[in-house]
Amino acid sequence: MAKLLNAEIISADSRQVYKYIQIATCAPTKEEISDVKHYFVNELEPVDEFNAGLFAKKARLIIKETLRKKKNVLVVGGSGLYIKALIDGLYDEDINSSEIRNRLNERLKSEGREVLYDELKKIDPESASKMDSGKFRRVIRALEVYYVTGKKISEFQMNNVKPDFESIQIGLKMDRGLLYERINNRVDKMLDSGLLKEVEELRHRNMSYKTHNSLNTVGIKEVFQYLEGEIDKENMIEKIKMNTRRYAKRQLTWFNADKRIKWIDATVNNLHEIIYENCIK
C-alpha cells in the first residue's frame, strides 16, 4: 500500500518501537524496512520511556517533513491511544492503562500512600498541591496519566494540541472466528520463528517484564513466566493465544467507537485496490 500511495510508514504500535523484540511484536523485517521507509520500529532500548504524548509529538514532525517531500504517510497499528493522540490530540479523560494502573495499585499496597504521593510531588507539584496523600485514587490517576503520556495531568486541558493535517481512517475487519484462528496460527508461527530464544536473550541482558514496562506485554510476559518455571509450556502457549484474543477484542471495542473509520473486509481478493480507492478520494 505504501508503494501504491507513494507513502512512508509510521508504526503506531507501542512495542514495535523497541529493540530486541521483533518476533514478539511481529515487527517489519529488515527487507520490508529497506524497501519502504519506516518510523518507530526497532529504535529504542527497552529501558527508554515512550508514550502516546511523545509519539504524537514526534510523529507530527515526521508527517510534516514527509508531506513537504510530496509523499504521503501511512500510520499503521496498533495502539488506539497513540493514534488518537496523533489525529485528535489528548485529553486526560482519554487516557487509560490497566497495566500501569494495576502496577501502581500493587505499589500502593507494598510501598504505601506517602511514597506515591511524594513521587507525584516531584513529577507534578501543581496537581499534588491540590490533593493530599489520603486521596490515593486521585494520586494514582495523576501518576497513570503521566506514565502513559509523559505529560502532567494539569497540562492537558490547557495544552491539548490538534494536528494540522487531514487523515483518512481505514480499519480491516473479518469474521471473529477467522480472526481468532489467525491469532492462534500467528502465535504458533512466532514460537517456530524463535520467540523463546528472543526472550532468553532479554533475560541474558538482565531485562524482565517485571522491571521494564516495554516488556510487560502479551507474548513476552508469558514466555518469561515459562522460563522462570511459573507455568508449563502448554499453559504458556494457551495463555499467549488467549491474551492475544482478549487484546484484539479490546482493540475492536476501541476502534468501533470511532465512527470516522471506514471498515473493509480484509479477506476480499481486491483489498489493496479498495483501500487505494478510499485513500485517493
Image: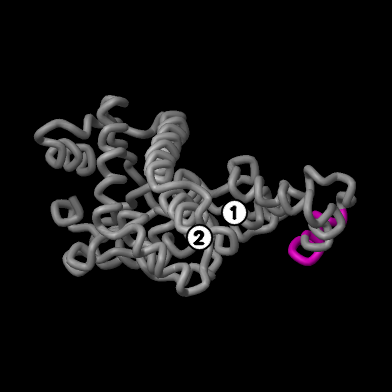
Asked whether residue 134 appears in the rendered view, the answer is yes
Who's the residue at 41% across and 43% down the image?
240
Q: Earlier along the polypeptide chain: callout 1 or callout 2?
A: 1
Q: Residue furthest left?
A: 269
Q: Is residue 278 above or below residue 201?
A: above
Of 95 and 30, nearer the camera is 30
Q: In the image, what residue type sits under mark 2?
A: Ser
Quarter in which the C terminus is drawn:
top left
Percent coordinates x, y for residue 135 in the rendering: 86, 44
Tell me the element at label 1.
Answer: helix
Residue 82 falls left or right of residue 118: left
Residue range (magenta): 120-129
Residue drawn at x 42%, y 29% is: 256
Q: Look at mark 2 in the image and give the residue it sits on.
A: 214
Q: Which residue is mark 1?
A: 148
Instruction: Describe the element under mark 2 as helix, strand or loop.
Output: helix
Q: Nearer the viewer, residue 242 or 98?
A: 242
Magenta segment includes 240: no
Quadrant of the rendered image containing residue 159 = bottom right
Q: Amino acid at mark 1?
A: Val
